Image (cartoon, rainbow, N blue to C red):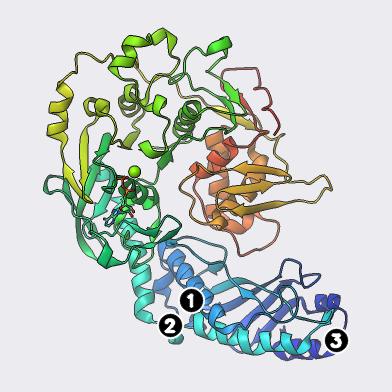
Amino acid sequence: MKTFQDLDNLLSRIDGKGYKAYKEIAGVYRFPGFTVMIDHVQGDPYAAPSRVRVRVSRVDGGFSADMTSAPVRKAALGDFLTRMFHLSATAVAKGGRGIGKGGQILIGRPAQEILDRTAMLVTDADVEARITMGLPARGRGVSGKDAREMFFQELPEIVKRSLFLPALSAEALENHLDTAEDTDALRSQLAANNLAAFVGNGALLPRASGIDPAPLPADQAVLFEAPRDMTVVLDAPHRGRVAGMGIPRGVTLVVGGGYHGKSTLLNALEVGIYNHIPGDGRECVVTSAGAVKIRAADGRQITGTDISPFIGALPMGRDTRAFSTANASGSTSQAANIVEAVEAGADMLLVDEDTSATNFMIRDVRMQRLVAKHQEPITPFVDKVRQLYADYGVSTVLVMGGSGDYFSVADHVIQMAAYRPLNVTAAAKEAAAWGADRRQQEGGEVFGPIGCRMPLPDGISPRLPSGKMKITAPRLREMRIGNRTVDLSDVAQLVEPAQTLAMGFAVHYAVRYMDGRCSMKDVAARVLSDIAMDGLDVIVPYIRGDLACFRALELIAAINRMRLLRVRQAGKEAEQKRGVQT
Ligand code: ADP
Ligand code: MG
């Protein structure tokens, strides 16, 4: 193996030569205490920065075998080291060396969640940071002096500060791993306790702002306190017994005045599918791993989805058992989102009136009098939500401050009053009895069939007209595959663009399983099982540090939103017609 001295000599030799001379430094170098792998060298100072890996053996780094003993601990160790690397790089890398990206030393910046990411690969043997470096230019040529500072001063200092235990707080690291393990343990006790979700006492739910997911400062927040009669105690291996509010499976309604904390509770449940970093405030908020936030998304693509449980005969006789549109309405999009989530395997829906289509949610007794049922294609959610649980075991938590029609279909009603939850189930049932004889149930006896669609590969191409492959995630909820944009603005549970980017590659990878016989759910399951086996690296053509794990539910949601998707429906020979190209 070459050594850092070889790299040093090489940089001296190419100093002042044309920038392309940097290409020569690709390779593997032994540094004191770690290995540097220069995988890809950028072609010019403005191009995507060079891809570099830094590997430290677990033992040299001082990390005990106990820290990598379980997948959840491995992920948490990787997450912690990524955060430390990010902090150290920000402090140490001088940046601004010449034109373009010169001087950058970057690693993906994690959000509030502990995720498995390619930024830091943790195995039993090593930890490996996948970073990018902007190689510095002087004029149009190689700046050997600046590059040497980056490789021999900055990089070793960052690595020393972040990938070696002596420089880290062992206590903070241990707490990080234990917290993740505790959260996993709480989540795994939901099913046995017949719970859909759990919110620990003392949780701090509100966020700093609508665009900042950090916790609201503690002195401004009311900490969560479960109503006595909904209190459940679960066990966490490190924290011990944790008391909090158990939300049972079934239909749960969250009511209360405006600004009393309803949506904040629901938002915390949405991300209760993830483990949160210590200090986040939601470390003991857990939701069933199959929970999906549902919202209206007018304008979305729908391809061959059976929305007939919610939407009946449409004007012009359009078939809603295999419904396609390039421009869904609020209500049809919400219907499709629910049906597709259940098709994909969701076991819990999270719905907020703030982001729902009114005509999908309610149809009150006066409207029933004025507009006859046969004149209204929509069967409102209020008449279907119970059947979803009875027929398919899918629970719902619904925020609804604006209509009492849901009282009669809810198993439990929680009122948020000045950010404190109260169990008002009995009072709500009493209120429901009042006027119960007047509103007609319109949902029939059963929910109705959930379709099973087989995606076809032909509409999915990552190629640009030039033939080049292009997959990017310009925003958290937008991916680009080839020259097509996939709008994920209603896929609420994505938390990092690294997940979105990984899903872009996963969609392309999934094409190998789209043979017209494999269902949407099976295609996603195969992709996820390949990832579970070989890591996220399997879905990309080369190693890159900017990917994070995602659920099958989000991958399927992304496939469903592709404009050129084509599907076969089980039992139907006809292929769905191609969506309108936009
Ligand atoms: P609702 O959905 O009931 O109208 P929100 O959940 O949107 O209310 O909350 C309204 C405001 O109150 C938000 O700015 C939110 O950050 C803040 N808030 C929510 N919960 C708490 C809490 N526990 N402590 C302090 N502020 C809170
Ligand atoms: Mg709200």
Residue 151 picture quarter? bottom right
Residue type beneath disc 1? Met
Which secondary structure, mark 2?
loop
The image shows residue 319 at horizontal and vertical percentages of 56, 15
The image shows residue 367 at horizontal and vertical percentages of 34, 15
The residue positioned 45% from the left and 71% from the top of the image is 80
Residue 265: numbered disc: none
Q: Earlier in the sequence, mark 2 or mark 1?
A: 1
Compared to 397, does 231 lie above or below? below
The residue positioned 71% from the left and 35% from the top of the image is 459
Residue type beneath disc 2? Leu
Q: Nearer the viewer, mark 1 or mark 3?
A: 3
Residue type beneath disc 3? Gly
Compared to 558, does 475 lie above or below? below
The quarter of the image holding the C terminus is top right
Tell whether label 1 touches label 2 (CB within 8 Å). yes
Q: Which residue is mark 2?
A: 168
Query: Observer-nearest residue: 21 or 406?
Result: 406
Which secondary structure, mark 1?
helix
Q: CA distance from mark 3 to mark 2?
A: 38 Å
The residue positioned 46% from the left and 46% from the top of the image is 492
Q: Which residue is mark 1?
A: 84
The image shows residue 245 at horizontal and vertical percentages of 21, 49
Q: CA distance from mark 2 to mark 1?
A: 8 Å
